[in-house]
Image (tube, helix red, strand yellow):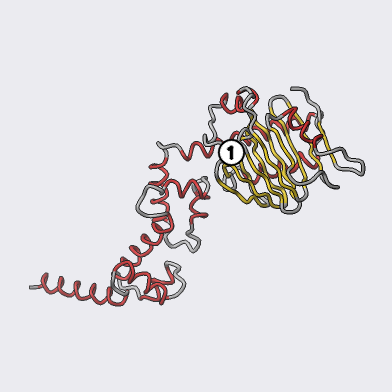
Amino acid sequence: MTSATVTWSACADAPSFSCLNDALAQFVPISVLDMRNRAGRGEFASMVPLDDVVYVDVSWSSREMARHARSEVSANGEYFALTAVRSGTEVVAIAGETHRLTTGDVVLWDCQAPTLFGVPSQLRKSALLIPTSVLKHMSLTPRGNRGLQYFNDAPTAPLLRQLLTYLGDHGQPLSPSYRRTRNALLELALGTIESTRDTESTSLVPALRASVSRWIDDHIFDPDLRPTTIAAAHAVSVRTLHRAFQAEPLTVAEVVSVRKLERARDLLSDGRSVTAVSAMLNFANPSHFSRVFAGQFQLSPSEYKQRTRAGQRETLMEASA
């Protein structure tokens, strides 16, 4: 693939939207059909093929489109698009699911999958089109349902957004710096996909669960003990964290709640007051703590303290007899 830029933009005498179709068809194995209107002012699509990947930067106003699969395309011509939404909203229907993408979303989708696009108003997005052959060479296999996968919570997502934006705003396709940025972006893209693959590996799920469980116990008094914090501490996405507990009786949030109440029971047994325990474990207030405690143990914290004291007295009496 040669290093050349294909740019289409709307102007007073802009050609029909088919010009963009031709550009897309030249480098990407998809067919795009504008279902609603022609190009408007301020719209553009810039495509920069560099070696085995293609950088795409587009701006669309309100429109609806359909992307149809091209069954005649060989495996060497199949692409996955790693895309960052820079501004606006896009509704994507793919693989039987509908997704509403908004500013900041980073997603990967299969360019061969039939897709419906809806742009309510103005949309700006940038993407890196990665051939399937590149992913296979790196032993990476994206989700096989020909759908859309989110990478919002991947540790690499912020850098990926920044680089995609930088290329769109400052790119000089033939400059050495542009090519170096392209290489960094490709490495980052592959790392993003690989991080999800690794954390979703069946062999790693039990280890992740065990690590999370230990971490919750060690940070039970932290005021910000939430799935987002737990996921960040383990360098995984919130989605991956939830999937790790999918087959378990309790969700991550439920595990946190149960561990807090178990620790509360120990503290009450040690003579701590209900108010003190509520504050230590960051419950909203003592009343909320009492309700949650009673729901778990069928006793209020005060009743539990009374029974604990009575049991301790009986044990002391038996020991002194």
Q: Which residue is under mark 1? A: 192
Instruction: Where is residue 52? Give x, y as percent.
Output: 69, 25
Quadrant holding the N terminus? top right
Quadrant holding the C terminus? bottom left
For this orientation, the residue located farthest to the left is 321
Q: Secondary structure at mark 1?
A: helix
Q: How many marks?
A: 1
Instruction: Where is residue 204? Give x, y as percent.
Output: 42, 38
In the visual, does 196 lie left or right of 264? right
Give neighbour class at mark 1: few <14, some 14-19, many 20+ (Cα, 10 Å).
some
Instruction: Where is residue 101? Give x, y as percent.
Output: 64, 50
For this orientation, the residue located farthest to the front is 35
Of the residues shown, which amino acid type is indicated by label 1? Thr
Residue nearest the viewer, comparing 97 with 305: 97
Q: Residue at x 41, y 77 (%)?
A: 287
Reply above or below: 249 against 267: above
Residue nearest the viewer, comparing 247 with 173: 247
For this orientation, the residue located farthest to the right is 12
